């Protein structure tokens, strides 16, 4: 009897672990979070007005209705602490509660940023020693999402466990767990976003200490080489992602820097294939119709947000060509898959062409294919069908047996 009940208990625990670590994690981020974050464009200059303008534009451009609901304030909102130790926002953000009310009135959610260290990466006030107090302040303001960025806590780890990597990592796990518990204690659901650049293979332990998403790499920047390096380095991580807990290859640079149309499409495609959080990072006051169409392509978003919650992975690589495949939720018993064929090379176009390599993704013979960006059915095709891709380009298909 005793053994039986123990087995039941362990079984329940394993089931809970398999579904994303318990109830708190399950109430948010059942699909990869979508929204906007201030860092990639505004960086340290972001103000209350930028956030309000962005909220207005998320609505008027249709982005909110396409799924982009989180408006996330990144670093540099923090002021000093008051006499009771309560964190204040700085002069750029005169009234955080009023801002949250405004954002909520638009049918959006508000995110904020802090660090487990004494200082954030931009050297503003961090949460060290104030975790419960800060989580409660965020809850009082009406915050729905916290990005927690290691930053100066790396120094604390090195100081407290010198020359002891395992000891440093243990401190890091504890610091993230501490804020997790603090959030849970507030009773307010918040998406909990880890930012520690993939240290200690965070995908292995992050979900166990409350992560809904975790950055897997260092920072993205608005150029093709950095974006594609980060995206491609997600190979092999698919098994760690699922409803409530996602790999985060960093926020989108679509519409930023010198990424051209083809590169923006490739960026969006790769992130959708990765079931990555889609957190736009562009200046919405200057968004072109082209960038808007890329960010809001319904079929591409549907691949990212697919209810099966499976991250795609690389199934083929040869020279500049790579094929990534992402299983999609069965439609009436017809297993389907999103398939992206990339040309990461410099030949423009690469006239060698590249075929589907269907065996690599478990298909025999031909498939019915739809070209997602072109919005065009290709009919039944097999490996002999060759795709000619531009430099840095991609073709995104949904294929069915
Ligand atoms: C780190 C993070 C970035 C951003 C900055 C803010 O570099 O990785 O995403 O939050 O800090 O200072």
Image (cartoon, helix red, strand yellow):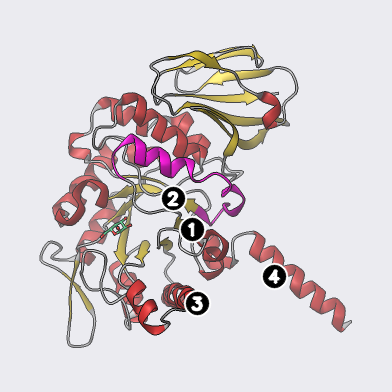
Q: CA distance from mark 4 to mark 3?
A: 23 Å
Residue linked to disc 1: 28
Task: Looking at the image, tell me whether mark 1 or mark 4 is earlier in sequence order.
Answer: 4
Q: Residues within 10 Å of mark 1 (few under 14, many from 20)?
A: many
Q: Please report the bounds of the magenta region as a residue range.
A: 221-246
Does dot 4 land on a helix, a strand or a loop?
helix
Q: CA distance from mark 3 to mark 1?
A: 26 Å
Image x and y of residue 231, in percent: 45, 41
Does dot 2 land on a helix, a strand or a loop?
loop
Residue linked to disc 4: 13
Q: Mark 4, mark 3: which one is toward the viewer?
A: 3
Residue nearer the viewer, 57 or 358: 358
Residue nearer the viewer, 229 or 305: 229
The answer to whether the residues at label 2 and label 1 have Cβ atoms under 8 Å apart is yes
Residue 38 in view (yes/no):
no
Residue linked to disc 3: 170
The answer to whether the residues at label 4 and label 3 have Cβ atoms under 8 Å apart is no
Numbered badge on residue 33: 2
Q: Residues within 10 Å of mark 3 (few under 14, many from 20)?
A: some
Which residue is at the far right? 1
């Amino acid at each position: 009897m005793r053994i039986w009940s123990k087995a039941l208990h362990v079984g329940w625990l394993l089931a809970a672990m398999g579904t994303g670590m318990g109830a708190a994690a399950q109430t948010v981020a059942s699909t990869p979070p979508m929204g906007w974050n201030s860092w990639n464009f505004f960086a340290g200059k972001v103000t209350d007005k930028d956030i309000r303008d962005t909220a207005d534009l998320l609505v008027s451009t249709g982005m909110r209705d396409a799924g982009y609901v989180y408006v996330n304030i990144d670093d540099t909102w923090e002021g000093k602490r008051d006499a009771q130790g309560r964190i204040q926002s700085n002069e750029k953000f005169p009234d955080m509660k009023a801002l949250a009310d405004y954002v909520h009135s638009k049918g959006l959610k508000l995110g904020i940023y802090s660090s487990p260290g004494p200082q954030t990466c931009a050297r503003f006030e961090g949460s060290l020693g104030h975790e419960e107090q800060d989580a409660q302040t965020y809850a009082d303001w009406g915050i729905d999402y916290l990005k927690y960025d290691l930053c100066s806590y790396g120094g604390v780890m090195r100081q407290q466990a010198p020359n002891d990597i395992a000891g440093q990592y243990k401190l890091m796990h504890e610091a993230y767990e501490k804020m997790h518990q603090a959030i849970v204690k507030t009773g307010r659901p918040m998406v909990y976003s880890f930012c520690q650049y993939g240290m200690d293979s965070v995908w292995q332990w992050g979900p166990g200490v409350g992560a809904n998403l975790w950055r897997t790499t260092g920072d993205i920047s608005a150029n093709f080489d950095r974006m594609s390096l980060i995206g491609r380095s997600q190979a092999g991580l698919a098994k760690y992602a699922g409803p409530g807990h996602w790999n985060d290859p960093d926020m989108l640079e679509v519409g930023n820097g010198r990424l051209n149309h083809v590169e923006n499409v490739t960026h969006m495609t790769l992130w959708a294939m990765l079931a990555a959080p889609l957190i736009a990072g562009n200046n919405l006051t200057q968004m072109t119709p082209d960038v808007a169409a890329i960010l809001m392509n319904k079929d591409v978003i549907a691949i990212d947000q697919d209810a099966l919650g499976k991250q795609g992975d690389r199934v083929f690589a040869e020279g500049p060509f790579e094929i990534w495949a992402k299983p999609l939720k069965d439609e009436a018993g017809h297993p389907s898959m999103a398939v992206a064929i990339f040309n990461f090379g410099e030949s423009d176009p690469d006239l060698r062409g590249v075929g589907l390599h269907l065996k690599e993704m478990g298909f025999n013979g031909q498939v019915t294919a739809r070209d997602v960006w072109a919005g065009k059915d290709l009919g039944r095709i097999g490996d002999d069908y060759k795709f000619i891709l531009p430099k840095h380009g991609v073709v995104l298909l949904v294929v069915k047996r």
